Amino acid sequence: MCYMFEVFYRPPADVEKEAALTANVSSFGGRLSHRELTNGESSAICLAYEFDERSQAESAAEALRKRGEHVEGPMEYGPNSK
């Protein structure tokens, strides 16, 4: 089982912000698994991060929330996809 959470932020896309978020999440064992740009239904950019352990995902999500990021999850996400 994998665990994931999503980070949402307002456009425009910010490569430096995304790199910093990904570096922070990576330090908890997470990896960027999906990036979704704005569309007609959403006005936010969404970054999905995947983890092998729920505790890693919870710790990373809490760290990002403390920095003021909008994080949804963590939640279970199918079989482990290393």
Image: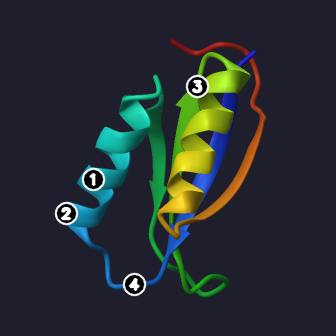
Instruction: Residue type at mark 3: give it.
Output: Phe
Q: Could you tell me residue 25's position as x and y percent?
A: 43, 39
Q: Residue at x 72, y 24 (%)?
A: 54
Mark whose residue sits in front, 4 or 1 = 1
Q: Residue at x 32, y 84 (%)?
A: 12
Q: CA–CA distance between discs 2 and 4?
A: 13 Å
Please, what secondary structure does the residue beneath circle 1 have?
helix
Residue beneath label 3, please? Answer: 51
Q: Residue at x 65, y 13 (%)?
A: 80
Residue beneath label 4, please? Answer: 11
Q: CA–CA distance between discs 1 and 3?
A: 17 Å
Q: Could you tell me residue 52's position as x and y percent?
A: 61, 16
Q: CA–CA distance between discs 2 and 1?
A: 6 Å
User: Which label's residue is closer to the chain start, 4 or 1?
Assistant: 4
Instruction: Residue type at mark 2: give it.
Output: Glu
Residue beneath label 2, please? Answer: 16
Q: Which mark is residue 48?
A: none
Q: CA–CA distance between discs 3 and 2?
A: 22 Å
Q: Could you tell me residue 79's position as x and y percent?
A: 73, 15
Question: In this rendering, would 80 be left or right of 36?
Answer: right
Q: CA–CA distance between discs 4 and 1?
A: 16 Å
